[in-house]
Image: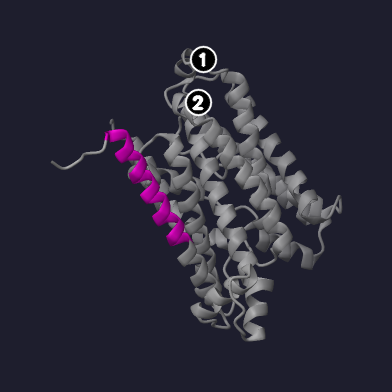
Amino acid sequence: MAMTLPSGERGMLLRMGVAALGVLALLLVMALSVSVGELHIPLRSVALAMSNQLGFTAEPLNRIHERVIWDFRLSRVLVAACCGAGLALCGAVLQSLLKNALAEPYVLGVSAGASTGAVAIVVLGLGAGAVSLSLGAFVGAFVAFAFVALLTHGARGGNERTILAGVAASQLFNALTAWTISTSASAQQARDVMFWLLGSFSGVRWPEFQLVLAVVAAGLVLFLWYARALDAFTFGDDAAASLGIAVPRVRLLLFTATALLTATMVSMAGSIGFVGLVVPHIMRFFVGPLHRSLLVACALAGAILMVLADLASRLLIAPQSLPVGVVTALVGVPFFAVIIYRSRTPG
């Protein structure tokens, strides 16, 4: 008689299988992105370069290929993967906290606020380096969150009003960013900043990767710790409180964490929209709504999507590059329209 596993164990095995496939797909996409470019590097050379660096092999390689891999492409691909994972995590968390299918940092104006803070640091000369940029972006992101919360506090019809408040916040902080650039930046600085604001990984290196990896990893651990609370928030604050969750404290903590993640990613690559909107909806279709599985799936899928978007940005008009935000918008806007259309239909 054939043995049958309990449903819980089957579900766990299924989640582990999906996670393993996601990791494998991410590694393959990253290897492809490192390989492809103006200088084509064979996938075998990419694999050997990583194996050599980790001490598993000592194969001789083309020095130019090895330098391109380690000094330019690999750090860029790793930062892109971390940013994609972080944006997808923020989208999943915000959609649960706000009970709104359209919630994500870009739509709610958080990315615009973070961009204003980062641009102020760069243009006004208030600091230098990834840490200073991240701090300025965090202040801007948190101010944007506070602005949206102020506009929606105590308002009825919260879902629609939250989106409207996010639109207002985006317009306000985009205007402040444009004002800062117009009045304080040189012509060359203005061009560089405007290209960066649309999303670009061209300037990131290993120090930026170390910072964004630490922040995204900490965010993932925190969100997984509060996965049960996020499940409860999906059904409303009353349901969460009935399960013994300290709603105001947990909500503030998770909002602050998403602001920090968003700020870090904006300081690395500019304002990249729609990743946090698209990925959680797709992953709910595959793994369901429970956040313990959803968060891991979103992190992997977001990383894959961002690496592919960065690759497309380098290839579509080669030898020039498109801003990554343009590529994600081309994918995200149609998906955004579908969500809005479906929200008009009962059920």
Q: Which residue is mark 1?
A: 244
Residue 179 numbered mark, or none = none
Query: Is residue 347 highlighted in magenta?
Result: no
Q: Which residue is mark 2?
A: 229
**Quadrant of the image occupied by residue 8:** top left
Residue 55 picture location, percent across and down: 63, 70
Does residue 164 appear left or right of residue 71 in this picture? left
Under mark 2, the amino acid is Ala
Instruction: State the residue in front, 76 or 6.
Output: 6
Q: Where in the figure is residue 172, as x and y percent of width and height?
A: 66, 41
Residue 9 drawn in magenta: yes
Residue found at x 58% / y 64%: 77
Q: Please tell me which residue is depicted at 71% across the width and 58% down the height of the picture.
A: 208
Quadrant showing the N terminus:
top left
Q: Secondary structure at mark 1?
A: loop
Indicate whether 232 appears above or below 343: above
Q: Main secondary structure of the magenta part?
A: helix
Magenta range: 6-26
Q: Amino acid at mark 1?
A: Gly
Question: Picture coordinates of residue 228 (x, y %)?
Answer: 47, 27
Is residue 111 something one can see in this rendering?
no
Residue found at x 72% / y 41%? 138
Report whether 133 appears left or right of 347.
right
- Count of number-bearing discs: 2
Asked if 248 appears above or below 177 in the picture, the reply is above
Give the residue furthest to the left: 1
